Image (spheres, helix red, strand yellow):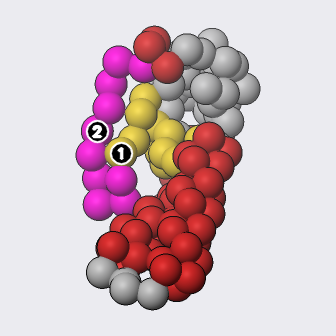
Amino acid sequence: MKCPICNQYSARKDVRTIRRTKQGIEKQCPRCKGWLKGDPKMTKVKNVAILGILLFNVIAVFTVDPSLRNILSSLGLASAFVAILALFRTQMVVAEMPKVMEGQSEDQNPASENQEDNKDA
């Protein structure tokens, strides 16, 4: 997994801290301690594809017509392909910047600059 904050690669087994939020699961980068989450657009695509798998295959089970059953099963298979593709193509995006990035003082941290700008507004 590549962290968009520090641009460093780390193995998924190195991620130790995970938290659940309303938007989903967030993981903490082991190097810069920033919080990362999956891309929301790809998460929606994955969820819709999983719903499509369920919907098309349940309807196919209760369908009597063999040609319609083949079409619905094909659509369920296509939904499974989209779900797998979305699962593997999802990139991590920043959920929360770290308090102080490693090797930087408080005044050099871009997260502290954003917080100061928000206080002025």
Q: Residues within 10 Å of mark 1 (few under 14, many from 20)?
A: few
Of marks 1 and 2, which one's residue comes earlier in the chain? 2
Tell me which residue sits at (40%, 76%) in the image.
Answer: 60
* Magenta stretch: includes residue 75: no
The numbered disc on residue 25 is 1
Query: In this orientation, which residue lies closer to the viewer: 88 or 63?
Result: 63
Residues shaded magenta: 15-24
Coordinates of residue 33 in the picture (x, y in percent): 47, 25
Position of 80 with respect to 88 (left or right) is: left
- Asked whether, in this view, residue 89 is left or right of residue 120, the answer is right
Mark 1 and 2 residues: CB-CB less than 8 Å, in contact? yes
Viewer-proximal residue, 68 or 120?
68
Residue at (55% x, 73% y) in the render: 70
Residue 14 shows up from this direction:
yes
As drawn, the label of residue 88 is: none
Tell me if residue 19 is in the magenta stretch.
yes
